[in-house]
Image: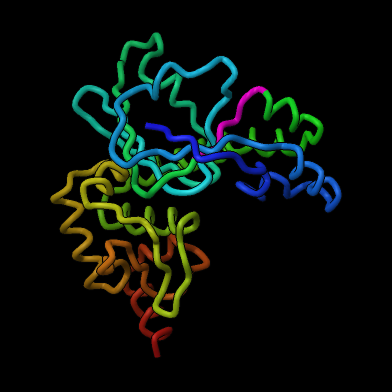
Amino acid sequence: MLTPTGSDALLDADPDLGAALDGAEFAAARDQVRVALLHLEEGKIRGKWGAGSPQLAGLLLVEGALLREVRTARRVTAELIGPGDMIRPFEEDGEEDVPVRAEIIWRTVLPTTLAAIDARTLQTAARWPAILTALLARGARRTQRLAVNFSLSHMVRISDRLLLLFWHIGSHWGRVTRDGVVVDLPLSHAQLALMVGSERPSVTVALGQLSEEGLVRRLEDRTWLLGGPVPEDVARLLTRTTALAAARNERR
């Protein structure tokens, strides 16, 4: 599943971890804090990614995208994981001592590179506490995104859930173009359904409506285009008339 691909400086793999360092500190940390890099083969993984190691604190996603599906009883939800996120798939969820058991399935959305954050990495990085603080903050950021996803899944209209989800993930994977914001993820209708707590047929219908309104459409390479300029307040897009008028005026 995981193929070693060499090593790299942690701050080359993820420069934002050194954002709080001055120039000299960044250069010193870049030179000394190194990580092993791993490539994750395409496909799906059920449950744990092997036995793991006591020395491995976690895996930092450097590039690519993963979808983490959680199956409980007859319901399935999904979390999109991308660059900068920390995961611990060697001690996978679903095995805790809780009444509701969960099955975890990981799927590769884009070719994925991971950095192994082990005891040696943390020991060396401890010379620059700001790096450790940044790593800890990644866990909090992922929790905050999950809270937003949870909130979106409780909206009544499927089209509203999808529209806000696309702009939400667009902040992470979006690329501004002349035509709008391109979300460089080949997400299927079925995967989007898991992310918004719906069924695939309902998502297909809602995406058709959003495409007709010029708000979201699929491109030939299976990525997605969010129509119009980047909104200051995404929630205003839920007022369709206002959103369409703004998009049309922008095109003129």
Asked which quadrant contains residue 250, the reply is bottom left
Relative to residue 125, is residue 178 depicted above or below?
below
Measured from the top left, where is residue 151 in percent x and y?
Answer: 40, 42
Farthest-out residue, bottom: 252
Relative to residue 236, is residue 121 depicted above or below?
above
Relative to residue 219, is residue 164 depicted above or below?
above
Q: Main secondary structure of the magenta part?
A: strand
> What span is in magenta?
114-119
Measured from the top left, where is residue 105 in percent x and y?
Answer: 30, 30
Q: Would you say residue 32 sits in the magenta stretch?
A: no
The residue positioned 59% from the left and 18% from the top of the image is 55
Task: Judge from the rendering whether residue 76 lies leftward or rightward of residue 252; answer left or right.
Answer: left
Position of the N terminus, as image quadrant, is: top left
Position of the C terminus, as image quadrant, is: bottom left
Q: How many marks?
A: 0
Q: How is the image coloured?
A: rainbow
Farthest-out residue, top: 97
Task: Judge from the rendering whether residue 97 lies leftward or rightward of residue 121; answer left or right.
Answer: left
Asked which quadrant contains residue 177, the reply is bottom left
The residue positioned 47% from the left and 19% from the top of the image is 52
Measured from the top left, where is residue 244 in percent x and y?
Answer: 34, 76
The residue positioned 81% from the left and 32% from the top of the image is 127
Asked which quadrant contains residue 238, the reply is bottom left
Front-lying residue, 210 or 8: 8
The residue positioned 30% from the left and 45% from the top of the image is 196
Measured from the top left, where is residue 72 in percent x and y?
Answer: 26, 24
Farthest-out residue, right: 24
